[in-house]
């Protein structure tokens, strides 16, 4: 099923050979000045609940688009990390976490194994991935691939990270998150230049 909130541009993701992936994620995270930012980016718990703790409010999800694509259209490292096969397809989800006042807190890009996404509720359009996993009592683990700066839609630098989520012994999805700079402070020590904006991000009015 395809759900569309707005139309994204062509897919583009950083690659393991790019500048962001060559630096250890722990080193990248230590460059952020604020302890809240370092704690969130390095945390292994659920992003949704961590942001709710920071904001002291509940969050919901607004799915901009969710659809299946042939894995061959995705970056090679995502195909390899998730062990995607053309016969099974790949689920791509673009979403935002929002407050009760509909203020955007994070912008998220997810690629998931369709069968695993359906079984775990990752493809549920009604709730954030974190809430879905909690509701089903599914513990998750994550392996951080990258942390650093990305531009918010208005151009401001924002804290961001990308990781692989595993349920049981199986990798189920790649997630890249960009956090609102007023919620997760992006102040950052001198280091590698921020990677360029990703043209696959799709936004409605924020």
Image (tube, rainbow, N blue to C red):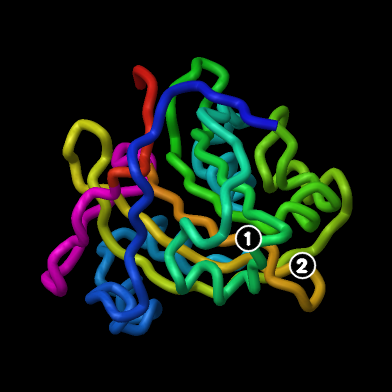
Residue at coordinates 55% horizontally, 69% vertically from top-left?
A: 79
Write the start and end of the magenta stretch as one range.
180-198
Q: Residue 132: which quarter of the image?
A: top right
At numbered mark 1, what does the secondary structure look like: helix, strand or loop?
A: strand
At numbered mark 2, what does the secondary structure look like: helix, strand or loop?
A: strand
113 or 133, which lies in front? 113
Q: Which mark is residue 167?
A: 2
The answer for how far apart the CA atoms under marks 2 and 1 are is 9 Å
The residue carrying pointer 2 sits among few (fewer than 14), some (14 to 19) or many (20 or more) residues within 10 Å by Cα, namely some
Give x and y (percent) for residue 85. Answer: 66, 67
Who comes first in sequence, dot 2 or dot 1? 2
Magenta: main secondary structure equals loop
Is residue 177 covered in magenta? no
Q: Is residue 173 left or right of residue 199?
A: right
Q: Residue 190: which quarter of the image?
A: bottom left
Residue at coordinates 33% horizontally, 77% vertically from top-left?
A: 21
14 or 88, which lies in front? 88
Location of mark 1 (residue): 173
């Amino acid at each position: 099923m395809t759900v569309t909130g707005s139309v994204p541009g062509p897919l583009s993701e950083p690659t393991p050979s790019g500048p962001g992936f060559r630096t250890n994620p722990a080193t990248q995270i230590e460059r952020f000045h604020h302890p809240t930012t370092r704690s969130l980016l390095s945390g292994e718990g659920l992003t949704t609940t961590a942001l709710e703790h920071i904001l002291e409010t509940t969050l919901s999800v607004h799915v901009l688009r969710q659809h299946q694509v042939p894995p061959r259209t995705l970056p090679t490292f995502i195909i390899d990390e998730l062990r995607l096969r053309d016969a099974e397809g790949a689920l791509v989800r673009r979403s935002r976490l929002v407050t009760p006042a509909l203020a955007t807190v994070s912008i998220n890009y997810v690629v998931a194994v369709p069968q695993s996404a359906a079984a775990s509720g990752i493809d549920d359009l009604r709730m954030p991935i974190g809430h879905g996993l909690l509701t089903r009592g599914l513990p998750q683990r994550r392996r951080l691939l990258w942390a650093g700066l990305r531009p918010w839609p208005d151009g401001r630098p924002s804290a961001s990270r990308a990781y692989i989520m595993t349920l049981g012994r199986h990798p189920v999805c790649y997630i890249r998150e960009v956090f609102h700079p007023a919620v997760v402070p992006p102040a950052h020590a001198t280091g590698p230049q921020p990677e360029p904006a990703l043209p696959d991000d799709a936004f409605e009015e924020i």
